[in-house]
Amino acid sequence: MKEIVSYLYRNYFEIAAFSVGLLLLALMDPNTTSGPGLCLLENMGFSYCPGDGLGHSISFIFRGEFDNALEANMLGPFAFIILSGRIFYLFSQNYLNQNKIL
């Protein structure tokens, strides 16, 4: 049992985490401003956070509002491409190497 859990964690945790994260960003309302702040820099008292609006930007991308996505955070489209590419890469690596035995 321990080997199975270790195998699943090693091979599928990253895919699941990134997929769930993107799914939640796709379902969130990008126009809302309420909610807790997760930026460590802002919580430490700094006024600037480089990730401000990143989730909103990705959420706008899912809705096809690319101008709002760039306005929310310029790095949003790049983060979306990188996350999507990583999910695709991990998925293809795990399913192309199906010769592995649990």
Image (cartoon, rainbow, N blue to C red):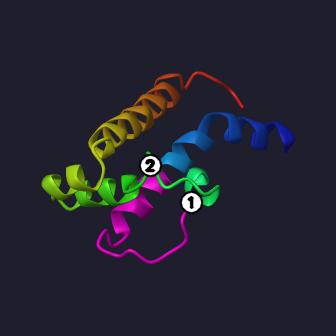
Q: Quadrant of the C terminus?
A: top right
Residue sitting at 47 percent across and 50 percent down? 49
For residue 51, the mark is 2
- The residue positioned 30% from the left and 50% from the top of the image is 73
Q: Is residue 42 above or below residue 102?
A: below
Dividing the image into 4 quarters, which one contains the N terminus?
top right
Q: Earlier in the sequence, mark 1 or mark 2?
A: 1
Reply yes or no: does residue 35 show up in magenta. Answer: yes
Q: Are marks 1 and 2 in contact (CB under 8 Å)?
A: no
Q: Residues within 10 Å of mark 1 (few under 14, many from 20)?
A: few
57 sits to left or right of 18:
left
- Please state the horizontal and vertical placement of residue 76, each as a whole percent of the image: 31, 46
Of residues 10 and 53, the one drawn nearer to the viewer in this rendering? 53
Q: Position of residue 62 (x, y in %)?
A: 25, 57
State the residue at coordinates (65%, 55%): 44
Closest to the observer, 67 or 22: 67
Please tell me whether residue 30 belongs to the stretch shown in magenta. Answer: yes
Horizontal arrangement in the rendering, residue 29 relative to residue 9 (left or right): left
Q: Which residue type carries mark 1? A: Leu
Q: Is residue 47 above or below residue 99?
A: below
The crowding category of the residue bearing disc 2, from other C-alpha atoms within 10 Å (few below 14, some 14 to 19, many at least 20), is: some
Which residue bears the numbered disc 1? Answer: 38
Label 2: state its secondary structure.
Answer: loop
Q: Which residues lie in the magenta part?
A: 19-38
Left or right, 64 with reference to 9: left
Q: Disc count in the image?
A: 2
- Element assignment for label 1: loop
Identify the residue at image location x=54%, y=48%. Answer: 16
